[in-house]
């Protein structure tokens, strides 16, 4: 199995999910779109993952490569019909690329917060054997607002209705982060855009509390990420 990963900033890689990929000997490679790397021929790949990043889906003037990325995502979903997993920005790009829309979330949703599966989510194979309510790391100021007719919302939170979705039978995405590692919050807090969003939303002293919350939930994060990975991989085979 060959997996392609789209990255938008160096620190937002597959994170904890790398442990499972490496354990299983998955042949995976990443493309650093923000560093000018080109999207390769998609044909040889069996699955596509699209990670998070500090830019917004509409920032095509500042990041013109977003145009090619959206086209590639649309082709992957509509033409190739192969498995897709999007996280945070990858969740928003899935909606945008297929004709949905995203908009600002005011105030942003930042913290270790609850997400809850919808009735559809409880039955969806991506969430098989997973708790119906989970703690999740949130760090976003944009939300998916409109989706295509073949989209099903799988999870929600108090602040954001679309926390997870499935498009057709082959594409899943989550607004929250499932790839959290012990150093994730500390590393992301060094990104100016993320640090400023944290301060603006929760205050100057918010980082220690966010670090503590993430650390306290690391075991649950890891268990849920491994289940999500397993369920996704079963969709590939």
Image (spheres, helix red, strand yellow):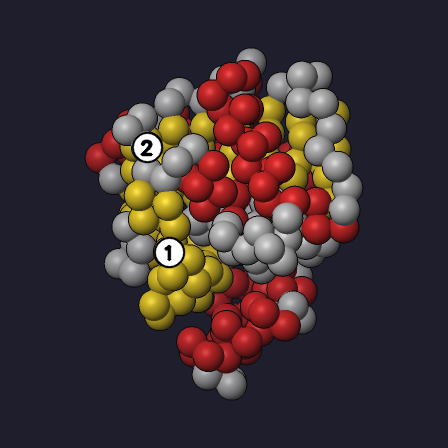
77 or 121: which is nearer to us? 77
* Mark before the other along the chain sequence, 1 or 2: 1
Q: Point out residue 126 in the picture as x, y percentages from the top left corner.
A: 42, 30
Question: What quarter of the picture does the C terminus occupy?
Answer: top right
Q: Which residue is mark 2?
A: 148
Measure the alpha-carbon separation of dots 1 and 2.
16 Å
Question: What quarter of the picture does the N terminus occupy?
Answer: top right
164 or 181: which is nearer to us? 164
Instruction: Find numbered disc 1 in the image and state the secondary structure of the residue it sits on.
Output: strand
Q: Which residue is mark 1?
A: 103
Name which residue lies at 65% across and 39% down. 6
Q: Which mark is residue 29?
A: none
- Asked whether residue 179 is in view, the answer is yes
Residue 184 lies in what quarter of the image?
A: bottom right
Name which residue lies at 74% across and 33% down. 29
Q: Eyeballing the image, is 55 above or below 192?
A: above
Q: Eyeballing the image, is 100 above or below 232?
A: below
Name which residue lies at 65% across and 45% down. 65
Does 137 sit left or right of 25 as displayed?
left
């Amino acid at each position: 199995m060959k997996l392609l990963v789209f990255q938008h900033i160096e620190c937002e890689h597959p994170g904890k999910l790398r442990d499972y990929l490496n354990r299983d000997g998955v042949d995976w490679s990443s493309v650093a779109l923000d560093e000018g790397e080109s999207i390769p021929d998609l044909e040889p790949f069996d699955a596509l993952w699209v990670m998070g990043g500090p830019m917004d889906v509409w920032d095509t003037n500042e990041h013109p490569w977003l145009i090619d990325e959206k086209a590639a995502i649309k082709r992957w979903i509509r033409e190739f019909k192969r498995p897709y997993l999007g996280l945070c920005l990858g969740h928003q790009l899935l909606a945008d690329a297929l004709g949905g829309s995203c908009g600002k979330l005011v105030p942003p949703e930042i913290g270790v917060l609850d997400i809850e599966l919808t009735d559809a989510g409880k039955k969806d194979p991506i969430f098989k054997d997973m708790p119906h309510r989970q703690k999740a790391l949130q760090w976003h100021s944009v939300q998916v607002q409109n989706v295509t007719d073949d989209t099903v919302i799988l999870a929600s939170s108090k602040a954001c209705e679309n926390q997870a979705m499935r498009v057709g039978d082959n594409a899943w995405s989550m607004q929250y982060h499932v790839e959290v590692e012990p150093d994730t919050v500390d590393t992301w807090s060094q990104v100016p855009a993320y640090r400023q969003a944290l301060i603006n939303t929760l205050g100057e002293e918010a980082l220690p509390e966010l670090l503590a919350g993430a650390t306290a939930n690391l075991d649950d994060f890891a268990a849920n990420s491994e289940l999500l990975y397993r369920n996704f991989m079963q969709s590939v085979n």
